[in-house]
Amino acid sequence: MMRLVMHDETGPKEIKTEHGDSVWVCMCGISRNKPLCDGSHKKTKDEVPGKTYIYEGDARKEV
């Protein structure tokens, strides 16, 4: 089954725990370690606003 989910964030969100530690949650949608960030958002740095991109594995395609 395939699902198309739209994300417009290009980085993670920092969540502070009750102990003051930081947990980074994926907001770009391409982390392989969801819901946690694995740094995959770095692939989105050169995206052009208003364009749509499809990420599949390590490949990116502009639509």
Image (cartoon, rainbow, N blue to C red):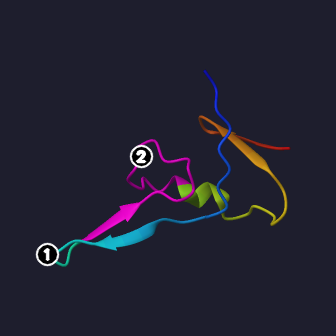
Frontmost residue, 17 versus 59: 17
Question: Dot 1: within a 10 Å radius of its alpha carbon, few (fewer than 14), some, or many (20 or more) residues?
Answer: few
Secondary element at image label 1: loop
Q: Is residue 60 above or below residue 51?
A: above
Residue lying at the far bottom of the rendered structure: 20
Place residue 2 in its image quadrant.
top right
Place residue 50 in its image quadrant.
bottom right
Question: Dot 2: within a 10 Å radius of its alpha carbon, few (fewer than 14), some, or many (20 or more) residues?
Answer: few
Q: Mark 2 points at which residue?
A: 34
Separation of residues labelled 1 and 2 (CA atoms): 22 Å
Q: Earlier in the sequence, mark 1 or mark 2?
A: 1
Q: What residue range appears in magenta? A: 22-40
Q: Which residue is drawn at 48% across and 65% down?
A: 12
* 36 in the magenta segment: yes
Query: On the rendered image, what quadrant is the N terminus found in?
Result: top right
Q: Position of residue 63 (x, y in %)?
A: 86, 44
Q: Mark 1 points at which residue?
A: 19
